[in-house]
Image (tube, rainbow, N blue to C red):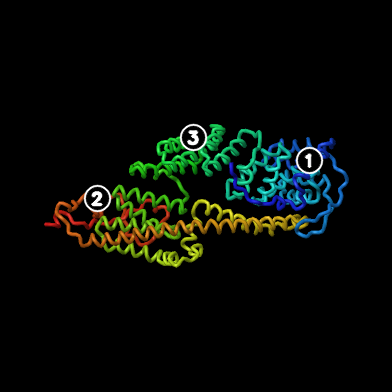
Amino acid sequence: MNRTTIALSTALALTMWTSTSTRLAHAQDRTARQDAAPPAEDKSGKDGAGESPSALKAITEGSAKTEAAAETDASSASGHPRRRAAPPETFQEALENYYADDFVGASAKMYDYLTTNEQTVENYEWAEYFLGMSLLRLDFRQAASEYLFNVAKDRTKPEILPEALQALEEIMQGPYDESLLDGQLLTDSEFGYLPPYVADFVAYHQGLADLRDGHVAWAERIFRRISDESPYHPQALYAIGVQRLRRNSMTDAVKHFRQVLEDPQAKRDLRNLARLALARVLYENERYRSALKIYDTVEVPELSTAEASLFLEKAWTSYWLRDYRKTMGILYALEAPSYREYFAPEKYMLRALVYKNLCHYIPAKREIRRFRFRFGETLDNIRDRIDLRQDDRLRIAALSRGKLERIRDFGRKLADEADRIATIGGEWTEVGLDDKLREIYRLKTERTDLTLSAELRKETRRIAEELVEFEEQMYLLDYEIGLEIYRRLKKEDARRPTKEDDLDIPATGDTSYYEFADEFWNDELPDYDFFVENRCFDEGAMD
């Protein structure tokens, strides 16, 4: 199976590390030590900041007294003077700090222990793990992921592996380094036996990678390993459903989406994704009323890009139901300041279509002019063949989509964490950990910026092609409206008035009516109706 890997040197994680071959060469010397070091007492009475008690037990079982500390031959990468090798007591003090929730002190001492000793020193792997966990508790997630990555990738202490993978799972709940954790660890490693929950986590990400690479049979075989009681089970069902949609297997896709909704382990966000997928399938099959009912059950964050996208899909559904008032109400909700940057050229076309169908030809042409005014500069830039990444509208639209949105969010997280390094100082400065973290974040930021630039070039091109297609459709619609204005209407083609045409506002009743004054209230956005009369000729007008 081909796996995409990125050459990121693990030497960046710890300055004084030797190669893995060196570590293995000294394995016999390491295991020959028999004297166990006493465990550190948890003076705070806390349960290890969330780690299992087995972690500390495993440390003490495999630990041994070391010889007198000797000065190492190398200095830290930050240029600090050489320091003497930290004694075993430094590791024990770091453990005490960690279990007392002093994560700054714990991380500084663990880093000192790692950078002033050879990899053959006892408890080296545990020091890596607790350094990563200390950084995670301080919300330096990228630095934590690099140290925990080394623990999980090397696997020289199998008892630490499940703990490290669970910590990485926590990191992956937000923006994270996909190239490192997905590409180089989870999808490119064989971990052997793992506890059931951790095994399900690994199986899901490995199966997802196979699906993305087109290895459907392999992915489904891996997904079958996931327990039915695991929260990753409904996620696997949803992934298979999406793959079936891409293959136009609508019936099978719907079955998987419904299974997601029935799974008690499915979380709210996943349920909403399944509902949205079902509504889209119904829309494509022209079952608009059923689609609209499901759209109404989808929950998305208020004033988000996801909500704007949902509004637009509901507007199209209402349009095909010929509920023009509701369609226009939704479209006007998209004019709210919170959605102003949302890239939706089709809203102008949809409004023009509604006006055209109601014989409001001048407003219909006005919407076409609004489209040209809104996107004219961008369309000129496309025709002038400039670097599309320099166009603000295309760049903002690209950065709000899929993979690019994740990369953008990860870049922001990197910048936030890098800025906070200077707020620690003290113990970190003494051992050079602050300079080491600055180097880690600098290199990762440079790599992320390169990835973002390359992906942005491709995505802005795709969006530009979409915009040009909309422009062509607007030209065609403009032409059709012109024909409609001068078309002779036959009596048998005349439209009869309906009850929905009655725009009279009652003097009394349970409903209050207000004239729209370009003020948007967030809680009212989903309920807007737009009162517009139908000006098409009826039979009476023809007589």
The C terminus lies in quadrant: bottom left
- Is residue 138 or residue 288 the one in the foreground? 288
For the residues labelled 2 and 3, the Cα–Cα distance comes to 42 Å
How crowded pointer 3 is (Cα within 10 Å; few <14, some 14-19, many 20+) is rated as some
Tags 2 and 3 in contact by the CB under 8 Å rule? no
Residue hosting label 2: 500
Q: Which residue type carries mark 1?
A: Ala
The N terminus lies in quadrant: top right
Furthest residue toward right: 68
For the residues labelled 1 and 3, the Cα–Cα distance comes to 44 Å
**426 to the left or right of 536:** right
First along the sequence among labels 2 and 1: 1
Front tag of 1 and 3: 3
**442 to the left or right of 112:** left
**428 to the left or right of 250:** right
| Residue 216 picture location, percent across and down | 51, 38
Residue hosting label 3: 263
Residue hosting label 1: 40
| Residue 228 picture location, percent across and down | 53, 32
Q: Which residue type carries mark 3?
A: Asp
Up-down relation of residue 395 to residue 18 (above or below): below
Q: Residue at x 66, y 52 (%)?
A: 8
Which quadrant holds residue 89?
top right
SS state under label 3: loop
- Is residue 132 or residue 117 the one in the foreground? 117
